[in-house]
Amino acid sequence: MPAITPPHSLQAADAHTPALAGQAVVLTAGDAAYPPQLLARLGQQAPTCLTLVGNASLLTLPKTALFCSARCPGSAILPAYDQAARWRDGGRCIISGFHSPVESECLRILLRGTSPVIICPARGPFKRVPPDWQKALDAGNLLIVSAFPVTEVRVTAELARKRNEVVAALANEAWFAHITPGGNNDLLSASLGRWGLRIESQNV
């Protein structure tokens, strides 16, 4: 796997310059390029910094957040894959943690095309880019956004919850392949409603 160059700060002078593939860029809350919707929606819970690898200009695109509970009924799986193919063919920018089994397969579907994709892992920045992501990264179709410090090397339930809040706060709308009643995605959808985001779900 290709190594990632250590991060540097993205100053106001080059705030709209895409990060090079494999080169990490750090945005702090005071930087001009730091997404204002994170502060507006998350307030003091907004991440103090973001580490970006890939095409940073993807953050300026209209984005659909994809969520799917880890426990997903079989009836929701194929429709989710079909939706991912429609997004891919239509060029829609999709942002997600791509962590649950259904989300992971949707990522594979998306990466078969050239539509923009933003991946937000529930951990600190990767030292190396996974090989399956490299082609999209080199083509400028992929951005990896980490909202956690380098010391967070393992995904936990709490990091996943916080990551999903960041994904939702960065998005313009959200699409839930499945929401488990009373689960984290159920609570998250309530927050999105308060923010005025359009929400679609296959099971509500």
Image: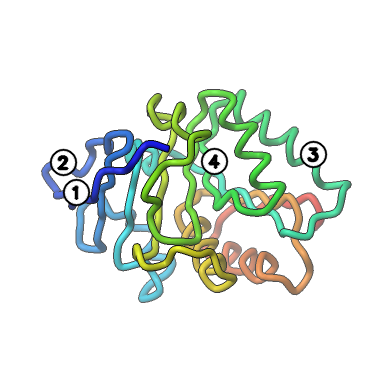
From this viewpoint, which residue is outermost toward the right?
A: 75
Q: Nearest the camera: 77 or 157?
A: 157
Residue under the point 47% across and 43% down: 118
- The three-letter code of the residue at mark 4 reads Ile
Instruction: Read off the residue under disc 3.
Output: 79
Residue at mark 4: 94
Any part of residue 4 in sight? yes
Q: Rounded to the nearest whole Å, what is the CA distance between mark 2 and mark 4?
A: 25 Å
Residue picked out by circle 1: 10
Where residue 90 sits: x, y (%)? 59, 25
Whichever of labels 4 and 1 marks the residue nearer the N terminus, that label is: 1
CA gap, disc 2 to disc 3? Answer: 41 Å
Left or right of 42? Residue 172 is right
Residue at horizontal 69 percent and vertical 54 percent from the top: 68
Q: Contact (CB < 8 A) between labels 4 and 1? A: no
Badge 1 or badge 3: first in the primary sequence: 1
List the residue tagged with mark 2. Answer: 14
Given contact means CB atoms under 8 Å apart, are the residues at marks 2 and 4 in contact? no
Mark 2–mark 1 CB contact (< 8 Å) = yes
Dot 2: element: helix
Gap between marks 4 and 3 measured at Cα = 16 Å
The amino acid beneath tag 2 is Asp
Q: Quadrant of the C terminus?
A: bottom right
**Could you say whether the residue bearing mark 4 is in a helix, strand or loop?**
strand
Amino acid type, mark 3: Pro
